[in-house]
């Protein structure tokens, strides 16, 4: 977005930023909900399907090497359990995504459904609506999802310590008044709001302002 306004060394660092695995998303309308074997899964807003530790490692290694996993890691979300207003009668919205290779352009729908069906036999018989979004379509929907990477960067040891580049202030872009606050900055994806919070503090420091720590409530 800033193009030639970025200092050359920072532009090079951003250009070389390493992205992570992609997501392949499947949205379902399921009559009666997902028929999980495990009763506890029928009450969970989010279910992680990875199998054994060995299966998870195998799937993640395959995807990181550019191969579609035979049994991918799949995350299933059932938010309607907390918000019944999302459902239409006994038809419930369920979405899932699998970890697939970065930029994957194949069809992983069957692999995602197979993985869920492994733990919820009869799922396909309950599906009354289905929509998918590939890594390419995810990037078209949001250019920040480069190659379908919804976590905004690979989670290697180096990237966890230095992202998006080695710098004392990773939020500064080298352009006065312009700061980076995406999940590409510390503490990374999943720690919602903290990237922007830290970027705001960086901006305030440049303006010579400080933010007082919030007061702890009285017992």
Image: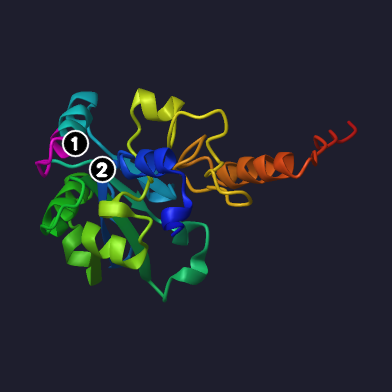
Question: Number of labelled discs?
Answer: 2
| Between 145 and 2, the one nearer to me in the picture | 2
Q: Position of residue 84 (x, y in %)?
A: 50, 66
What colour scheme was applied to this rendering of the protein? rainbow
Q: Quadrant of residue 93?
A: bottom left
- Of all residues, the one furthest to the bottom in this rendering is 88
Q: Image height check: is 188 above or below 141?
A: above
Please say whether residue 134 is visible from this viewpoint.
no
Q: Please name the predominant secondary structure of the magenta segment in the image.
A: loop
Q: Position of residue 128 (x, y in %)?
A: 24, 73
Q: Which residue corresponds to mark 2? A: 21
Q: Position of residue 60 (x, y in %)?
A: 21, 34
Tags 2 and 1 touching, CB below 8 Å: yes
Q: Bounds of the magenta span?
A: 62-70
Looking at the image, residue 174 sits to the left or right of residue 76; the answer is right
Which mark is drawn over residue 146? none
Is residue 59 found left or right of 89 in the rendered image? left
Q: Residue at x 69, y 41 (%)?
A: 201
Residue projecting furthest to the right: 218
Q: Mark 1 — residue?
A: 64
Residue at left offset 38%, top offset 45%: 151
Residue 10 visible within the image? yes
Q: Secondary structure at mark 1?
A: helix
In percent of the image, x 61 and y 44: which residue is there?
199
Q: Residues within 10 Å of mark 2 (few under 14, many from 20)?
A: many
């Amino acid at each position: 977005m800033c193009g030639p306004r970025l200092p050359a060394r920072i532009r090079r660092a951003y250009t070389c930023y390493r992205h992570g695995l992609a997501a392949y998303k499947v949205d379902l309308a399921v009559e009666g909900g997902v028929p999980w074997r495990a009763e506890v899964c029928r009450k969970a807003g989010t279910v992680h399907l990875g199998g054994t530790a060995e299966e998870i490692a195998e799937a993640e290694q395959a995807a990181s090497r550019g191969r579609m996993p035979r049994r991918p890691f799949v995350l299933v979300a059932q938010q309607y359990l907390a918000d019944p207003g999302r459902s239409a009668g006994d038809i419930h919205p369920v979405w899932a995504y699998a970890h697939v290779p970065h930029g994957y352009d194949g069809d992983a729908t069957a692999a995602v459904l197979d993985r869920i069906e492994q733990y919820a036999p009869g799922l396909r018989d309950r599906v009354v609506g289905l929509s998918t979004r590939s890594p390419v379509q995810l990037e078209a929907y949001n250019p920040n999802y480069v190659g379908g990477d919804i976590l905004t960067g690979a989670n290697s040891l180096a990237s966890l310590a230095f992202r998006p580049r080695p710098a004392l202030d990773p939020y500064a872009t080298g352009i006065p008044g312009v700061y980076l606050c995406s999940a590409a900055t510390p503490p990374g994806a999943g720690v919602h709001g903290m990237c922007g919070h830290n970027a705001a503090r960086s901006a305030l420091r440049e303006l010579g302002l400080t933010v007082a720590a919030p007061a702890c409530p009285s017992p």
